[in-house]
Amino acid sequence: MPIVDKGDHVQIDKIETAPFGTNAYVLVCRATGDSVLVDAPGESHRIEESLKGTNAKYILLTHGHIDHIGALSELKSRLQVPIAAHASDTGSLPSQPDILLNDGDGIAFGNVKLKVLHTPGHTPGSLCFLTDRYLLSGDTIFPGGPGRTNTPRDLEQIIGSITRKIFVLPDNTRIHPGHGDSTVLQKEKEEFAVFSSKSHSSSLCGDVLWLSS
């Protein structure tokens, strides 16, 4: 299980899971060993193994799509920790979350505090989680573009979420998305500047890339 980042207070481990190649992340307070799990996509045994030696406190959901919650019921049963999500995505969850998260909320574990960013567009209840210069972005932003959208209005919404909530963060912020590799905020801002300098069809949505769409 690769360690994708290690700061003064937090270590971030990534587990890429089958069957959709979805990333789950384990964030561990380096001082206390308290941890949180971000998303519960699949292969619950691998995720549970990655939490061994830590004191799991929460399962945090970036959104309610099946490729991010496939192992949720099993992990909830085995870990016996609260599930936290945004109210707008609860309809797609197997059970109601224990905690409803809103934009600007804080989640503490050990000496680490996460800030909740509500970033709708991919889903109405999409969330990102920020600590220090590390952003767990779910399917809101990836290297090279935003998350998939179903309508032009969704694309407009997700771009608004990205520009208002994410692009205001420091340029050296490390972005850890729900699929694939990590990226750095400055690179995404530079590529978005290319995208925003061009005109686009009013029907644009789906899998959009900053440089080629």
Image: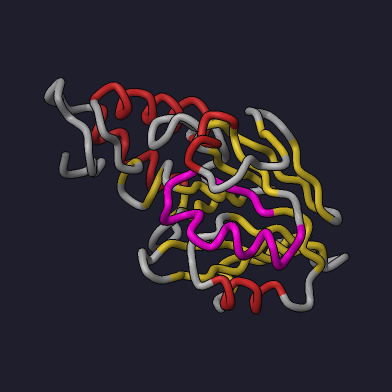
149 or 187, nearer to the observer: 149
- Up-down: is 1 above or below 155? below
Q: Left or right: where does residue 197 sit relative to residue 88? A: left
Examine the image and state in which quarter residue 140 appears.
top left
Above or below, 110 against 53 in this view is: above
45 relative to 202 in the view: left or right? right
Residue 201 sits inside the magenta stretch:
no
135 vs 99: above or below: below
Q: Is residue 8 visible?
A: no
Q: Quadrant of the C terminus?
A: top left
Q: Residue, x 58% and y 62% (percent of image)? A: 25
Report x, y in % for residue 19. Answer: 37, 69
Q: Quadrant of residue 21?
A: bottom left
In this rendering, does residue 73 appear at all?
yes
Name the residue nearer the viewer: 172 or 1. 1
Magenta region includes residue 65: yes
Q: Residue furthest left?
A: 201
Residue span colored magenta: 59-80
Query: Who's the residue at 56% across and 71% down the image?
Result: 44
Q: Quadrant of residue 11?
A: bottom right
In which quadrant will I find the N terminus? bottom right
* Vertical side of 86 occupied by 2: above or below: below
Q: Picture coordinates of residue 57 (x, y %)? A: 78, 57
Seen from the viewer's position, the closer of residues 126 and 133 is 126
Task: Give the residue drawn at x 59%, y 30%.
Answer: 87
Where residue 109 sits: x, y (%)? 81, 53
Query: 86 and 203: which one is in front?
Result: 86
Q: Which x, y percent locates residue 55?
A: 81, 67
The structure residue drawn at horizontal position 26% and vertical position 28%, both measured from the top left corner, is 196
